[in-house]
Amino acid sequence: MNILIACLILFGLVAAWFTFHYLASAQVDNPDGSARITGNCGDTMEIALQIREGRVADTSCWTDGCSVSKSCAETAALLARGRTIEEVRRINMIAIMDEVGQLPDTHLHCAQLAETTLQRAVQDYLGKLGANCCSHPH
C-alpha cells in the first residue's frame, strides 16, 4: 500500500512539473521570427521573437533537452529582449555562457545550439521583413 501511495505522489509531481514547464510556458503569439533546430546531440530547441518598433519586445523558447540546454535557450531568449536586431545579431555562445555560468565541456554544444537557434530566428524575421517590403506593388 505504501508503494502505491508513493507512486501516486511521484506521478502527481511529474504531472505538475510537465504542466509547469511545457504547457504553462508562455509562447509568443504570431512570432515575427522563429526557428526550431535539432542539434547533433539530439536536443531540439525553439526560439520565437516578437519585434516592435525595431526591438525585440518578447521572446519564448522551448527545448526537449537537458537542464543545461534549457538554461542556454532561456538565456539566449532573455538576452535578446529589448535589443535591436543588430544587437541580437551580436549575441553568441560566449555571451550566453557568460550569463549561464561555467558549463561542463560536455555541454558547450548547448550554448552553440542556443546561439544558432536565436540567429536563425533573426534570419527568419529578416527574411519575412524583406519579403513583406517587396511583395506589394509600388
Image (cartoon, rainbow, N blue to C red):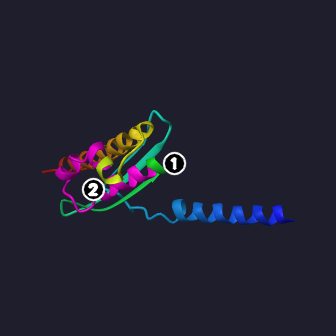
Residue 102 vs 23, above or below: the answer is: above
Q: Which residue is mark 1?
A: 64
Element carrying mark 2: helix
Quarter placement of the N terminus: bottom right
Image point (82%, 61%), residue name: 3
The residue carrying pointer 2 sits among few (fewer than 14), some (14 to 19) or many (20 or more) residues within 10 Å by Cα, namely: many
Residue 28 vs 113, above or below: the answer is: below
Image location (x, y in percent) of residue 52: 23, 63
Write down the quadrant of residue 109 in the picture.
top left
Label 1 with label 2: CB-CB less than 8 Å:
no
Farthest left residue?
138
Element carrying mark 1: loop
> How many numbered marks does the figure carry?
2
Separation of residues labelled 1 and 2 (CA atoms): 21 Å
The residue carrying pointer 1 sits among few (fewer than 14), some (14 to 19) or many (20 or more) residues within 10 Å by Cα, namely: some
Q: Which residue is mark 2?
A: 80
Can the viewer see residue 135 in this picture? no
Q: Which residues are magenta?
A: 70-96
Image point (52%, 61%), residue name: 21
Q: Amino acid at mark 1?
A: Asp
Q: Amino acid at mark 2?
A: Ala
Residue 107 vs 53, above or below: the answer is: above
Image location (x, y in percent) of residue 28: 38, 61
Q: Is residue 106 in the magenta section?
A: no
Image point (18%, 59%), residue name: 54
Residue 101 as seen in the image, left or right of residue 39: left
Image point (32%, 44%), residue name: 115
